[in-house]
Image (cartoon, rainbow, N blue to C red):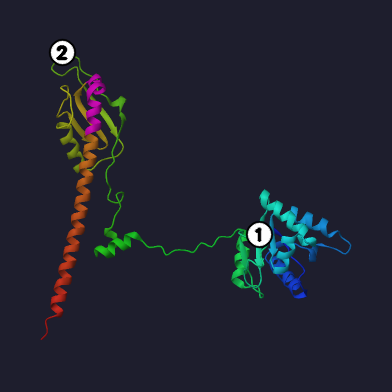
Amino acid sequence: MDNKAVTIVYSWDNEDHVKWVKKLAMELEKHNIQVTYDQNSLELGDDVNQFMELAVDTASIILAICTEKYKMKIDNREGGSGYEGRMIAQIMRNHSAKIISITKDGYSDDKIPRALQGIYSLNLEEDLDKQGFANLLQVILGYKVVKSKEKLDPRKTIAEALDVDIDDVKTDEELALSDIKILNIISEDVTLPKMDGSRGSALYNIPFKMSEIPTDRWNQYFIHFWNNPSKYSSMHRSKIASIERDVIWLNGTTIEEVKNYHRDTLILAVNEANNAYNKEIVENEENRIRDIDKRNKLKKHINDEIRDITF
């Protein structure tokens, strides 16, 4: 994180107060924060007003140490504090710097100048309270405290609630649900018609590439939905579909029929096969978990009854 710089403004109430401000500045510098204030930046003979004007005007963060005396001088525009008070009021109007009001013996409206009331305030106590100082470092350096939260494994929670093994709790991907798509026609494998005048000699065998090799059960669903589509035209040819690995074959049709009719029926049959296959897998898994739950409950019942039997 880049070094941060602050300017401290305050009133010289008494020697103890001046020492407290110096102590605050030194603690900030220990934490790699550059501090500008009269005790480390103003030399004998320097123009106090000019120093304050430059320090306040160029500051990105101003720490205003608020006391009853400081409030009186700022509110009444007295002396150097009154001069810097006018500059602070201008900064607040222009939003050109962040101003933090600080007290060391409890927050009170009697200590906060009217111009600074309502802005972010901190009380550091005489001994530079650790928590208060830590909060000041947070504001200056931009740190956020994000408490780590306990992370629970939802799979474990589900397994414990259903009294099943954690390996029995699976996602859709782990259940190997199907999402097969037709990718394209394998043009180089389209069979050429014989065109010899015999029955069916003008028809083609046309292969369609699928996105993966389906299971035998999926194949059964697809053939069923091809032979019995929920929507079809009078040109639909049932019982011409077969599957070899990741290829659907339509044996005995034409390219024109595929283009005008069979394409839509193919997509429909594939989607319905996916849905039916997935539904069966999910139902089987739910039934399996339900059976495990029943067995576990029965075992618990038997054990409870056994404990009631004494000899």
Other-residue count near label 2 (Cα within 10 Å), few / some / many at <14 / 14–19 / ≥20 = few
Q: Is residue 221 above or below residue 288?
A: above
The residue lying furthest to the right in this view is 45
Q: Nearer the viewer, residue 59 or 291?
A: 59
Q: Which mark is residue 188?
A: none
Total marks placed: 2
Q: Position of residue 266 (x, y in %)?
A: 23, 30
Q: Residue at x 14, y 32 (%)?
A: 228
Q: Which mark is residue 197?
A: 2
Tell me, yes or no, if residue 35 can be seen here: no
Q: Secondary structure at mark 1?
A: helix
Quadrant where the N terminus sits is bottom right
Amino acid type at circle 2 is Gly
Residue position for label 1: 116
Q: Nearer the viewer, mark 2 or mark 1?
A: 1
What's drawn in magenta, residue-wise?
254-268
The residue lying furthest to the front in this view is 76
Q: Nearer the viewer, residue 258 or 71?
A: 71
Q: Is residue 218 above or below residue 199?
A: below
Q: Residue at x 25, y 27 (%)?
A: 263
Other-residue count near label 1 (Cα within 10 Å), few / some / many at <14 / 14–19 / ≥20 = many
Q: Residue at x 66, y 59 (%)?
A: 116
Q: Main secondary structure of the magenta part?
A: helix
Q: Does 33 sit left or right of 224 as displayed? A: right
Q: Nearer the viewer, residue 72 or 188?
A: 72
Q: Position of residue 178 (x, y in %)?
A: 27, 43
